Image (tube, rainbow, N blue to C red):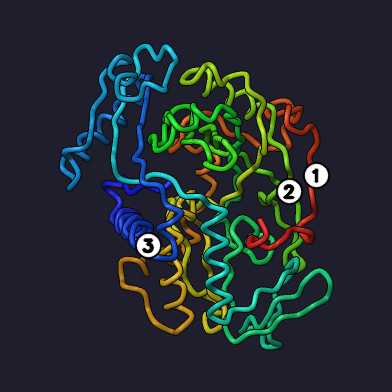
Amino acid sequence: MVRSEFAGDQVIQRISQAAVHAWRTDSLFKLHFHETGRLSLANSPINVPEILQLYQELSTSPHRDQVRWLDNAEEIKTFAPYLTGAMTGWKGVFNPEGGWVHARNAMKTLGDECVKMGVTFVRGTAIKLIYHASDLKVIGIECADGTKWFADKIVLACGAWIDTLIDMQGQLVAKTWTLAHVQIRDEDERRKLKGTPVVFDVEKGFFFEPDHDTGMVKVCNEYPGFTNYQHILVNGKEKWVSVPVHSDSIPARSSREIHDLLRSMKPEWANLPLHNARMCWCTDTADSHYLITPHPDYASTLILASGASGHGFKMLPIIGKYVADLVEGKKLEPLFQETWRWRPEMNVGKRLSDDSRPGIGGDLNDAEQVGWKDETQSATTYHSATTYHSATEH
């Protein structure tokens, strides 16, 4: 989901607007961007003011003539007749800017372009950093099979795996969100849904139009994310941190919430079987800003690029230039340098009871709360820290 509705946060608003422009215009990315707009919905006293504020902000935007406030279920269904739930008491706002991106195809296009430009991709499971004897430099990466890779500059852009390689001093927490797909087999229904906006219930989650080739509709439930706290060794020291789980399933609670989301807006889809259920791991910072900076202890060789806090993929066309500037020894402009700096005083502990997203989070080790009996697959596998693949493989 690509959007630029971040009024009040100068940094995220600037880069998200730049990203939307790039998705529209960059020849590498624009074929994968579907600017359908976004329909944001809410029905609780807590969340209706949120979308009303969004409407007020959008009313001063360059595309304000296309912004719509939808005050009740009748207006919502007139605007979006494919929403068939009762939706009593719901209100909505339509923003024509933004939409969704076919993530797999965009990443493949980007990878192919990198190869054309001379980039060599290697695969492996990174298990530790290699330090110079003086300990003042990080000079390489060692993989599980014993292969060692050395470089003058190393960028740690490994998402939720970063805490397994270096002590981040509590600045980050790995969390997972969940998604699944329902398949729309009727070709006439697929055609009717083509180009429809992303539908985002701020309390329950979102879905968007079916994939053209498969008829699959991606559905994501909204909640503060699950952690997975484990004891792991990093540089010989035991740490208690949240680390990713490799699984082709989702917790039973997530399945129920996805069905509930569909039941409220598309009841005819509510009992469809779920396909391709996945956990999507991300790395949250306490303030939801990136951590893009040289490591203070190894500034000459080690650059950190992490802390996407749910804003990573939507920035794909533009975020790399800031990392590239650091690799080339350039300084970021002061606003970004200050916002994305190393900041251990901003401990991520407060995000464990995250009030920036509705719903209830939890830890995957709490079987009673989360549950693993899922209709798509009933088992999951927990791996030790030394078996996690690099983020490029997920």
Q: Which quadrant: the N terminus?
A: top left
Q: Position of residue 288 (x, y in %)?
A: 44, 51
In space, the residues marked 1 and 3 are separated at their CA atoms by: 37 Å
Q: Which quadrant: the C terminus?
A: bottom right
Going from the N terminus, do you reach mark 2 or mark 3 first? 2
Q: Position of residue 152 (x, y in %)?
A: 59, 87
The reply to whether discs 2 and 1 touch (Cβ–Cβ < 8 Å) is: yes
Going from the N terminus, do you reach mark 1 or mark 3 first? 3
**Numbered label attached to residue 91:** none
Pick whichever, 251 or 392, lies toward us: 392
Q: Is residue 335 above or below residue 313?
A: below
Q: Position of residue 218 (x, y in %)?
A: 55, 37
**Numbered label attached to residue 381:** 1
Q: SS class of the residue under badge 1?
A: loop
Q: Position of residue 190 (x, y in %)?
A: 49, 31
Q: Who's the residue at 68% across and 50% down the image? A: 244
Q: Who's the residue at 52% across and 41% down the image? A: 212
Check disc 3 and give the amino acid type: Thr
Q: Is residue 149 above or below residue 287?
A: below
Res 215 quadrant in image: top right
**Numbered label attached to residue 246:** 2
Front of the two marks 1 and 3 = 1
